[in-house]
Image: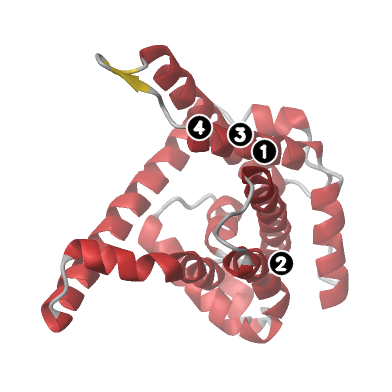
């Protein structure tokens, strides 16, 4: 891929590449199964959780994360369709680094949320349960906005092979700010599914929710491909000079 693509061509290329990639559809399907299993929950009896079902659910989630790592890596390193082989063979070392990165992300996010909750509770005097209930309706949109702010983070991690958390956060935020005028396409793909979900009535069939989630997953891969290919054409050290 060369830097000669226009903005419209980049967007169209991301859509086509995601749609024609068997590996992307494999990960989207795996996410569908993982979410379906999550909605079913883990049954419990008098002796506690159903162990075989719990182990099966854990294996399914780990398999999904493994495929995700392979897809992120394959799309960042190649410029053609993502094959099933590329998704299925990311390697143990890459998978371990990916898990460690998200472990650090989870700890950091939990720390930030707890500090925010303590500050808010001290300021307005609400209980933790009441705070969670008040924030719950806005949480999906808040996560979508955060996803847009950090939209270049995972693409940058895999393009540069840099799995440091805070260093890549800083570079991703700087890139997103520099490319703010071109972020309308990404914002539409990330926020539209969440906005549609919030507009739906409460009594919505599970099939519709899962279908909407699957669509959001596919749109997310289009966003990832767009960001990956822009970063490959404009390495992070040179991005400040690119429009």
Residue drawn at x 73%, y 58% as measured from the top left: 222
Which of the numbered marks, if any, corresponds to residue 66?
Answer: none
- The secondary element bearing badge 1 is classed as helix
| Marks 3 and 1 in Cβ contact (< 8 Å) | yes
Q: Can residue 95 be seen in this view?
A: yes
In front: label 4 or label 3: 4
Callout 4: few (<14), some (14-19), or many (20+) C-alpha neighbours within 10 Å?
few
Residue drawn at x 65%, y 67% as measured from the top left: 196
Q: How far apart are marks 3 and 1 (CA)?
A: 6 Å
| Marks 4 and 3 in Cβ contact (< 8 Å) | no
User: From this viewpoint, which residue is outermost toward the bottom?
Assistant: 181
- The secondary element bearing badge 2 is classed as helix
Percent coordinates x, y for residue 107 in the rendering: 28, 52
Q: Is residue 90 left or right of residue 94?
A: right
Callout 3: few (<14), some (14-19), or many (20+) C-alpha neighbours within 10 Å?
many
Residue position for label 2: 230
Residue position for label 3: 67
Which of the numbered marks, if any, corresponds to residue 27?
Answer: 1
**Badge 1 or badge 4: first in the primary sequence:** 1
Q: Distance between the residues labelled 4 and 3?
A: 22 Å
């Amino acid at each position: 891929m060369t830097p000669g693509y226009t903005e419209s061509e980049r967007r169209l290329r991301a859509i086509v590449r995601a749609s024609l990639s068997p590996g992307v559809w494999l990960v989207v399907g795996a996410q569908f199964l993982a979410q379906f299993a999550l909605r079913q929950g883990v049954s419990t009896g008098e002796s506690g959780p159903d162990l075989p079902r719990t182990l099966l659910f854990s294996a399914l989630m780990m398999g999904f994360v493994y495929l995700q790592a392979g897809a992120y890596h394959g799309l960042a390193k190649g410029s053609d369709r993502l094959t099933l082989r590329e998704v299925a063979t990311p390697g143990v070392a890459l998978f371990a680094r990916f898990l460690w990165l998200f472990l650090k992300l989870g700890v950091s996010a939990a720390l930030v949320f707890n500090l925010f909750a303590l500050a808010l509770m001290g300021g307005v005097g609400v209980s933790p349960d009441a705070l969670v209930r008040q924030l719950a309706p806005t949480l999906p949109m808040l996560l979508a906005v955060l996803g847009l702010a950090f939209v270049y983070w995972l693409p940058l991690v895999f393009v540069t092979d840099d799995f440091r958390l805070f260093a890549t956060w800083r570079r991703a935020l700087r890139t997103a700010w520099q490319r703010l005028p071109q972020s309308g396409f990404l914002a539409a793909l990330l926020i539209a599914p969440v906005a549609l979900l919030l507009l739906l009535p409460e009594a919505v069939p599970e099939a519709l929710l899962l279908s909407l989630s699957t669509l959001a997953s596919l749109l997310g891969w289009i966003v990832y491909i767009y960001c990956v290919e822009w970063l490959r054409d404009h390495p992070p050290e040179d991005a400040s000079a690119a429009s």
